[in-house]
Amino acid sequence: MTNSTNPIPNDNKIVALEAFEHVHNEQASRYLELAQTIDDQVRETEPGMLVHALTKSATNGTETVFRWLEVFENSSALEAHINNPHVITHIEKLNNGVLSNATELVIYAHWDEAMKTYWLKRLSGAKLSFAPMETGFFLERC
């Protein structure tokens, strides 16, 4: 996990993340344009991203909720995604009137409390939760 020479916790287990983005209905077309752009950029710049898929989760009179499913080779790949300049720019664009509410992040991982604490601090500006696993597994990637 963490140590004094490597502050970023890592293991070789796959990590999944769901990101629920609440979008003003009148911004949905703009959002989808931005989503296609970031999808292309992530595909080109993040070899540790195994799955990057967007779906529409819900719609009401004022907003549409889109759900990204992101599967990472390991926690280092998740860290690379968060540090990706394209992702940082994408988030800045979304926060400029496209989103109607804060993005909710749900992480699926087989992590101990120290690892969860690291990510809660690392992503302190986000609405972050960890999926309560009843059963399941995470494969290790070599």
Image (cartoon, grey):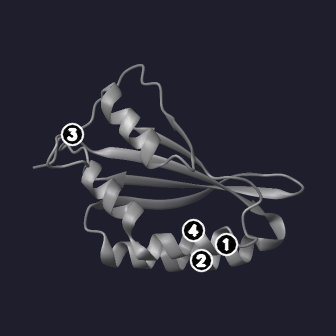
* Disc ID at residue 2: 3
Q: Residues within 10 Å of mark 1 (few under 14, many from 20)?
A: many
Pick whichever, 41 or 88, lies toward us: 88
Cα separation, mark 1 vs mark 2, equals 5 Å
Residue 138 visible here: yes
Asked if marks 2 and 3 touch (Cβ < 8 Å), the reply is no
Identify which amino acid the numbered label 1 is placed on: Tyr
Who comes first in sequence, dot 4 or dot 2?
A: 2
Q: Which residue is mark 1?
A: 31
Image coordinates of residue 43 in percent, x first then y, are 36, 73
Who comes first in sequence, dot 2 or dot 3?
A: 3
Q: Which residue is mark 2?
A: 34
Q: Secondary structure at mark 3?
A: loop
The residue mark sitting in front, 4 or 1, is 4
* Disc ID at residue 91: 4
Who comes first in sequence, dot 4 or dot 1?
A: 1
Identify which amino acid the numbered label 4 is placed on: Ile
Q: Considering only vertical position in the picture, is 34 above or below 64? A: below
Asked if marks 4 and 3 touch (Cβ < 8 Å), the reply is no
Q: Secondary structure at mark 4?
A: helix
Image coordinates of residue 2 in percent, x first then y, are 21, 39
Residue visible at 49% across and 75% down in the picture: 38
